[in-house]
Image (cartoon, helix red, strand yellow):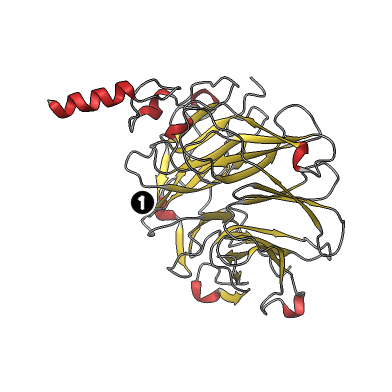
């Protein structure tokens, strides 16, 4: 009885401006789908009551019904699920139709792409576990998906793309090696040959792109612990299986996710990295090794109810405030803080040109650990929503609904 009294008094005197009461593990339920002051909603695809830790988000219309479905891996749970989009009428409700795959072990990242050249999109969990899509008619039974295990250990950011220019999609793992798609026996791990790229200890972002404009694809990497932001320069077809030269863009370590896109509408692809500050790399040349002007923008003040310092983590570039052609930079904080976006005036070449605007999502304090920002039109209304995963606050797999067309 005394313990109950103490807890009640604690809740009564705790100051939480958005709530006015004690936080609870299920508080998020009151705010799912509720429209915030700026019109944004936080919708739940699937909650995470047992802290299985969803930590990877992939979207594609796997069943061919015109709606985007979602493939998610669970880090602590050690399994993956394919969620079927319920359609516009039920889109804001939890998605109850899903296929759960046999456990593959702890898994922090996943990716998708066509790894057997049959036109269907396959799934890769944790870099080493490939699940081959059996086709639309058979995909609802996980036993129909052929699993191929290339290796068991963790390798973040599996990325599918044609590395050697032979027209077949290959697989980059951990930003330090790649596997060549074989011409035959594609679902046999022994047929996949591994080639080392270089050393990356903790890859956060890995992007396949011709960054120097010489006609072949380089590999852009945001690496958290060892080399910072760099790219592997494609050495050409004759040396494609050798280690690739490393070109450093920013040696600062400790950054989180990074995105490639044209921030200031000058026709050049810039970089944005979430670190202690938002690091914006505006490209100033067109061809050859990239040259950047680096701008660092401070994090904004958070609402009074947010009791932690905002730590930028996820990042995306999209149009938010109807000032086309200028697009905004959206930031997802990792812990218990409000999302915000950056917009600029003038040429954007100075920190003073940039302004941060909080996005006023309901009850940010309840979202304990979020991931990267994934742009996807889940509700099919023509604007891009922002999806992510939330690991420790019960929210689970969520999407921030863009109010632009409402």
Quarter residue 216 falls in? bottom right
| Front one among 7 and 237 | 7
Return the residue found at the far left.
1
Quarter residue 217 falls in? bottom right
**Dot 1 alpha-carbon crowd within 10 angstroms: few under 14, some 14 to 19, many 20 or more:** some
Looking at the rendered image, the quarter that the C terminus falls into is: top right
| Front one among 170 and 218 | 218
In this image, 29 relative to 4: left or right?
Answer: right
Q: Residue at x 45, y 33 (%)?
A: 365
Q: Which residue is mark 1?
A: 77
| Front one among 181 and 241 | 241
Q: Residue at x 74, y 69 (%)?
A: 233
Q: Residue at x 42, y 33 (%)?
A: 366
User: Would you say residue 377 is visible in this rendering?
Assistant: no
Across and down, in percent, residue 87 comes to 53, 29
Across and down, in percent, residue 66 comes to 60, 35
User: Would you say residue 164 is visible in this rendering?
Assistant: yes
Across and down, in percent, residue 302 comes to 55, 32
Looking at the rendered image, the quarter that the N terminus falls into is: top left
């Amino acid at each position: 009885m005394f313990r109950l009294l103490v807890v009640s008094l604690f809740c009564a005197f705790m100051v939480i401006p958005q709530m006015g009461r004690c936080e609870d593990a299920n508080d998020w339920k009151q705010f799912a789908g509720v429209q915030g002051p700026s019109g944004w909603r936080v919708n739940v695809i699937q909650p995470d009551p047992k802290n299985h830790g969803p930590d990877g988000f992939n979207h594609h219309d796997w069943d061919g019904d015109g709606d985007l479905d979602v493939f998610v891996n669970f880090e602590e749970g050690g399994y993956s699920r394919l969620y079927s989009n319920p359609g516009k009428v039920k889109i804001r409700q939890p998605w109850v139709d899903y296929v759960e795959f046999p456990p593959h072990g702890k898994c922090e990242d996943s990716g998708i792409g066509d790894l057997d050249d049959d036109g269907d999109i396959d799934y890769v969990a944790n870099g080493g576990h490939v699940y081959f899509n059996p086709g639309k008619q058979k995909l609802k039974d996980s036993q129909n998906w052929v699993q191929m295990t290339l290796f068991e250990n963790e390798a973040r950011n599996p990325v599918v793309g044609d590395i050697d220019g032979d027209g077949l999609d290959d697989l980059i793992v951990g930003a330090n090696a790649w596997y060549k798609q074989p011409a035959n026996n594609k679902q046999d791990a022994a047929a996949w040959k591994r080639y080392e790229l270089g050393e990356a200890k903790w890859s956060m972002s890995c992007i396949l792109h011709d960054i120097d404009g010489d006609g072949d694809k380089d590999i852009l990497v945001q690496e958290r612990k060892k080399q910072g932001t760099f790219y592997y320069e494609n050495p050409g077809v004759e040396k494609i299986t050798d280690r690739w030269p490393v070109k450093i863009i920013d040696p600062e370590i400790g950054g989180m996710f990074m995105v490639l896109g044209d921030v200031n509408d000058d026709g050049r692809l810039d970089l944005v990295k979430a670190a202690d500050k938002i690091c914006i790399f505006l490209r100033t040349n067109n061809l050859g090794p990239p040259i950047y002007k680096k701008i660092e923008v401070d994090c904004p003040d958070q609402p009074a109810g947010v009791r932690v310092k905002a730590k930028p983590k996820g990042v995306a570039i999209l149009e938010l405030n109807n000032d086309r052609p200028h697009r905004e930079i959206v930031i997802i904080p990792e812990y218990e803080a409000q999302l915000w976006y950056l917009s600029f005036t003038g040429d954007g070449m100075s920190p003073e040109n940039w302004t941060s605007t909080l996005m006023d999502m309901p009850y940010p304090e309840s979202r304990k650990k979020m991931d990267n920002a994934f742009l996807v039109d889940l509700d099919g209304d023509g604007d891009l929503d922002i999806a992510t995963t939330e690991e420790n606050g019960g929210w689970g797999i969520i999407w921030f609904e863009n109010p632009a067309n409402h």
